Amino acid sequence: MRRFSTGWLAVVSLLGVVGVFFFCEYLIYYPVILRCAWPKLSHVRGGEVADGRSTGSTLRAMVLSDTHLLGAVGGHWFDKLRREWQMERGFQTALWLLRPEIVFILGDIFDEGKWSTPTNWEDDVRRFNRMFRHSSDTELVVLVGNHDIGFHYEMDWSKLQRFEKVFNSTSTRILTKNGINFLLVNSVALHGDGCPICQSVEKELVKLSRDLSCSLQKSPPSSSNGSDSATEGCEGAESYPPTPPIMLQHYPLYRVSDASCTGEDAAPPEERHLLFREKYDVLSKEASQKLLQWFKPRLILSGHTHSGCEVLHDNSYPEVSVPSFNWRNRNNPSFILATLSEGSHSLSKCFLPEESTVIAVYSSAGALLLLAVMAHCLCFKTVGPLLPCLSLCALIGKHKYL
């Protein structure tokens, strides 16, 4: 009878351990992300949504930031394994349940891109491609961050071109999808000190500003009669849909601090009043004003601070800072769900499981298992180990006979 009880407890304990592990490392992402939903637009021009996919008049975009895949120098193997598994499960579950049409990652993809050797870089890229794999129905767009190519004083052409080659794009450009203009900015190069990369990026931004301005000024074909004074100087300009862009970049625009930021994903209270450093924590005032004047964006999405914040610049231009997607940087990672059209947008936040919750589940399960072993030992006077990890019974039995 004692052997039967001991064997039964061993089987139940093993099943419990496997079940808790499976729940914490896989299943938990589903009920948490299922609570998220695509926000609805105040109005949608044209078609309707069918079968969970948007028509040509709307676009469903998922936005995350600061994944910080650990590198070969500062990354412990277990930390890498743990954080990358969490991000992979969070991302893959979100793709399966929410089916975004496009995904933006706002820089700092890698933690050590600024000093990675070619071999380490290839390994980091391989792991990224595995974690953030996606079907052909979803477009993945990656922006550059300071950890990918280095801070302004560390970046060079080789690092920038290495990044652009991997992600098959230039770091500053306009992407148009479903009639919506997305302005992708290499904000690491906006120091305004005349460095070669800075000059190149600023030159491209001036050109893109002119192209967008000309597109906005063009008259409808029915009212156009030859040359129009409003489009003078627009010869050779590239044509885009005539709507203000959504601007995406790694660094936030200039703000004094996070003092006005609220919400569960905002910076901790003790950090919100710390002053930001221009060109390090946020863009400079000058660079920020240039971007606003050149493009007059209807929405700005940025990363870098690892915390969420909403700011209204010049009472006209809303900016949303997207928190880090990595549990190493915060207890409650999240991403943005955006429903977009040519003339409107609506955002909502989707939180991933909190690491404190996972730890609490593991701790509770461990405590219950320990209590079950102790109860078994006390009831059946077990003096031998149940399993190698249950040898506590021997100690308890010995203590009872003293």
Image: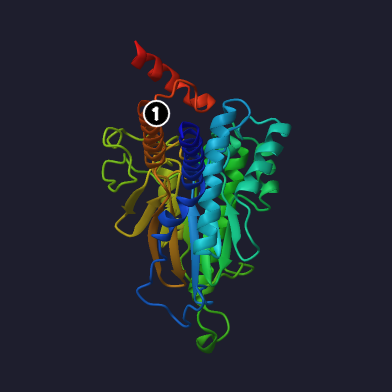
| Residue type (three-letter) at the residue carrying disc 1 | Phe
Q: Residues within 10 Å of mark 1 (few under 14, many from 20)?
A: some
In this view, the residue farthest toward the right is 119
Reply above or below: 104 against 55. Answer: above
Q: Is residue 216 visible?
A: yes
Q: List the residue tagged with mark 1.
A: 380
Number of marks:
1
- Residue 261, above or below 387: below
Residue in the image at 46% along x and 81% along y: 48
On the image, which quarter does residue 297 sit in? Answer: bottom left
Quarter containing the C terminus: top left
Q: Position of residue 339 (x, y in %)?
A: 44, 67
Tell me the SS state at disc 1. Answer: helix
Q: Quadrant of residue 111?
A: top right
Residue 332 x/y as whole percent: 39, 44
Q: Is residue 360 left or right of residue 76?
A: left
Q: Is residue 21 left or right of residue 268?
A: right
